[in-house]
Amino acid sequence: MKFKHGIVLGSFLMASVLACSGPKGESGNPKIGFAVFKYDNTFMSGVRRAVDKAAQGKAVVLTQDSQDQQAVQNDLVDNFLTQGVDALIINPVDRTAAAVLIQKAKAQDVPVVFINREPEEADIASWDRVYYVGARAADSGTMSVEILLDYFKQNPSADLNGDGMIQYVVLTGEPGHQDAVLRTKAYIDTFAASKANGGMGGQELMSDTAMWDRARAQEKMAAMLTSYPDRIEAVLANNDDMALGAIEALKQAGYFGKDGKFMPVVGIDATAPGLDAVENGTLLGTVLNDAASQGTDALNIAVALSNGTDPAAAIAVPLTSADGQSAGRYVWVPYQKVTRENYRNFMNK
Ligand code: BGC
C-alpha cells in the first residue's frame, strides 16, 4: 500500500503505524486543515466556497478563522497538526511569517499549500512539499488601467482639464500585501507605457490605504474629494470592496445621480457585488481574480499530496517556478478584464 510519502509498508508495520497516527478521516478521505486569514473578507469567502465545493466526496476540510492575527493562526496550525491532518491550506495573515508555519508542518511531514498571500520565494523553496496558489498581481493592475484608457479614448470629454493626462486617485489594499504593492506599481507603469507610446498618461493625485475594506474606502474617498474638488478624473481601487466604498462616497458627493455626473471607477476581483455594480453602471470595470479556480486548485493539490499522487495531474494549469519560466510549485491563475461587454459571463459562478 502507498502511504503518505509513497513508502510501501508491510502489513505488520502498517497496522501499528495506522493505530498510532490514523490521519485519514472516517470516510477514508484525507483530512485537510484550512486556515483563512479572516472570515470577514469578501474575496476569501469566495475561495472558501470553492474549496468546500471541490472537496465534496474527496476530502474532509476543517476550516478555521485566523481573525487577522498571526498568533491565532499559529495556534490553529498547531491544533490541525495535533488532530492529524494530512495536509494544510494556509492563507497567511502575515506572509512573512510563513517560515514558522512551514517548520511546524515539516516536523510532522504534513504538506502545505499557501494561497492568496504569497510567502517569500525562499520559504516556498525551503521544502519540496510546499506549494503556492495565486495570481500575478501586476497583470490585474495593468488590466485596470487598460479599462480606463479605453474609456477615455471613447469619451474624450472625461479628461476634464483637457491636458491629455488622467488625474486619478488610488485606494490601496493592506500595506505589504503583494497584491497591493504590485497592482499599484502596475498602475503607474501602465500609464507610463501608454504615454511613451503616444497614448494618454496618468497623474496620481493621491494614494491611500483602505486595507481592502469598503467602509474605510468610503471615508478615504470622501477625504480625497474634499482635497481635490473637481480635479479627480478616475478612481483605481486595489479591490472591488474598496471600489464600492468609493462609489458610496461619490454618490454622496452627487455622482451617479439623475444629472448624469459620472466618475470612472475600476476595481479588482469581480465579486458578486462588484459585478452588480458593473451591471447598474456605477463600476466602470473590474478584473476577475478567480476565487473559484484558486480554491479548487489549492484543494486538489492538497488532496493529491495527501494521497501520494502527482499534484501536477490534479490541476488544469501547469505547476511552474515563481517566475513561471520553468517547472516548480506555483500555480498562477490568470486574471481577466470585466466590463459591461462581458460581465454576464462571470455572474453566478
Ligand atoms: C483580493 C482582495 C482581498 C485580499 C485578501 C486579494 O487578492 O483582491 O480583495 O482582500 O486578496 O488577502
Image (cartoon, helix red, strand yellow):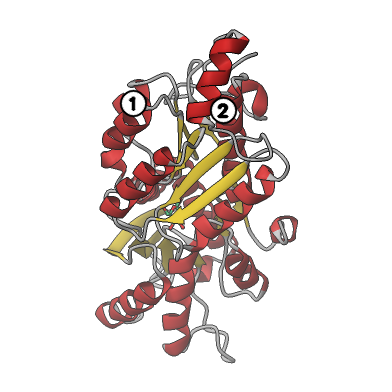
**Residue to which mark 2 is pinned:** 306
In the rendered view, would you say 49 is above or below 3?
A: below
x then y, percent, for residue 306 = 56, 28
Quadrant containing the C terminus is: bottom right
Whether the residues at callouts 2 and 1 have beta carbons within 8 Å, the answer is no
**Residue to which mark 1 is pinned:** 107
Instruction: Name the quadrant where ligand 1 sits.
Output: bottom left
Give the quarter of the image for residue 174.
bottom left
Q: Is any atom of residue 6 visible in this view?
A: no
Which residue appears at 54% of the width and 10% of the height?
Answer: 7
Question: Tag 1: residue type?
Answer: Ala
x then y, percent, for residue 110 = 44, 29
Kind of element beneath mark 2: helix
Query: Foreground: 336 or 187?
Result: 336
The label on residue 61 is: none
Which residue appears at 52% of the width and 78% of the height?
Answer: 262
Alpha carbon separation for disc pair 2 and 1? 16 Å
CA neighbours of label 2 inside 10 A, class few (<14), some (14 to 19), many (20+): many
In the rendered view, would you say 230 is above or below 284?
A: below
